[in-house]
Amino acid sequence: MLKMRMRSLWIGGWIVLSLFSEYGAAQRPGSLVLKPGVRQLFLDDHLLGNLYRVRRVIHQPHRYEGSPVVRADQPWEIRPGRYAAPGTTPVESRTIQVTSAPSWDPGEKVWKMWYHGGPGKTAFARSREGIVWEKPALGVKEFRGSRENNLVAVRGEPDALVQHVILDPQGTGERRYKGLLGPRDRHPVVSADGYVFTRLDVPPIPSQDTSQLTYDELGKQYILTVKHRGPFGRSVYLTLSRDFEQWTDPQLIFHADARDQKLGEQRIREHLVDPRLYTPEFNQPENYNAEVYKMPIFPYEGIYIGLPNYFESSGITPPHHNNQDGVNSAKLATSRDLINWVKVGSRESFLPVSRLGEGRIDTAQVLPVSRPIVKGDELWFYYSGVDVRYPARGAFQAAIHLARLRRDGFVSFWADEKGGFVETGTLRFGGTQLWVNADASRGEIRVEVRNPGGRKALEGWTRQDSRPLTTDQLKVRMQWEGKDSLESLHGQGVRFRFHLKDAHLYSFWFE
């Protein structure tokens, strides 16, 4: 069993429409030590001291205009409708879904993606830039008498479904690629080429029908979240491994609560009255419920970020389907130890479903992959988009989509034209320069350095000494008149107060 350090966290996050009280404090004893080069985000209150007239804003990724980027267009990705409601005719389903982020292969200089290519099938695609995806013929698995397809195989198991395939940066030889077999419980598998996998002779990991796998560069371990029941239904359990063979017992780490039930009811009622949104087939107020369907977890700049998929149920479906109708979309959560999690902001959707429209497939379910990929100054979020939750005509459409976000752009602090400030707690830091990711294109940002209690600015480091930032920059150095370095502040605890005027502050760090 891996040992994990426990720490309690608290958050007072507010989404766009909610102001902080004029002053908010998160005082902590002692000083926080920040490593050079690690960006500090504002998903929780861990770094915060005093706040004045600022709002915490959640920013949603922008859908790529050409999305979906991968569609079901091969015979093995298309299936006929299995049943039809009275008076309707079954129609075919064109469905592919993805659970793991694309992996970059530095040798071949391509992105590699493994996805669900039809019932019981895992398929492979590759791309130079992450937009146009090729489905090469691998020649390893037979479909209707031919191996001219992009399906991957498992030795000795012709019907096995491989999930969550990653190109492991720590893996070599026969273990360069790793994945898990489903659909219930999870069996580790490995591969030398990503095309033919071998089951490891280890015990299965208990799980229901959904899970998420990530390699954790921060903790040098594999993170697997699995689904089991908890408070209010589907919930997220965590299991960890150092070697991909021995796994910790699944531990409950995240679930819906009473407030989520109220938000889920609100979401369903919005869909029932807005003709631009997907309308659930079944509306049974007595059966409304909010659950956490699954949660990808990934390390980012020294913290962990989760994308909990909230399934907000509108009712129970008929016996031949035996499930629930409703809406499924992703929100934001964060943790510093993988055990204690904070629900960010006002729990609004981070990756919401799309409005109805021509070509839209992500109108009822948005299911993000294991993590975003870093592309220049952006984070790219791939996700499965599904057009319905309950297929009344026995069919549904699903494809792989893409949404993009500025780097560090999950959350910002913002003040209007009247101004406000964000003050850190007492910090000790390495590095000689302060950098920020911020948008001050309509206003300005200045920074002052204050004493440990935050009661006064240090001489030469005041707001007036700070050179203003008045542009939108993902990386810009903050400077003070007559100061070339922060080195004189080393060894003493100080606070940084960011004065914002009609500006967004996404992150800061030292170099």
Image (tube, rainbow, N blue to C red):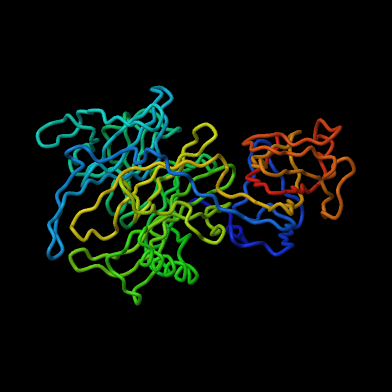
Residue in the picture at 65% in, 62% down: 19
Quarter of the C terminus within the rendering: top right
Image spot of residue 468 (x, y percent): 76, 39
- Dividing the picture into quarters, in which one does residue 506 lie? top right
Query: Residue 75's x, y, as percent?
Result: 16, 39
Residue 209 versus residue 367: which sits nearer the camera?
367
487 relative to 408, above or below: above
Q: In this view, does 156 lie to the left or right of 98?
A: left
Q: How many marks?
A: 0
Res 420 visible: no
- Percent x, y of residue 455: 85, 55
- Residue farthest to the left, as pictured: 145
Q: Is residue 7 above or below residue 146?
A: below
Tell me what residue is drawn at x 23 percent, y 66 percent: 322
Outermost right residue: 459
In the image, is 11 to the left or to the right of 392? right
**Where 482 sits versus 244, above or below?**
above
Residue 55 falls in image quadrant: bottom right
Residue 376 percent coordinates (x, y): 52, 31
Question: Can residue 489 be seen?
Answer: yes
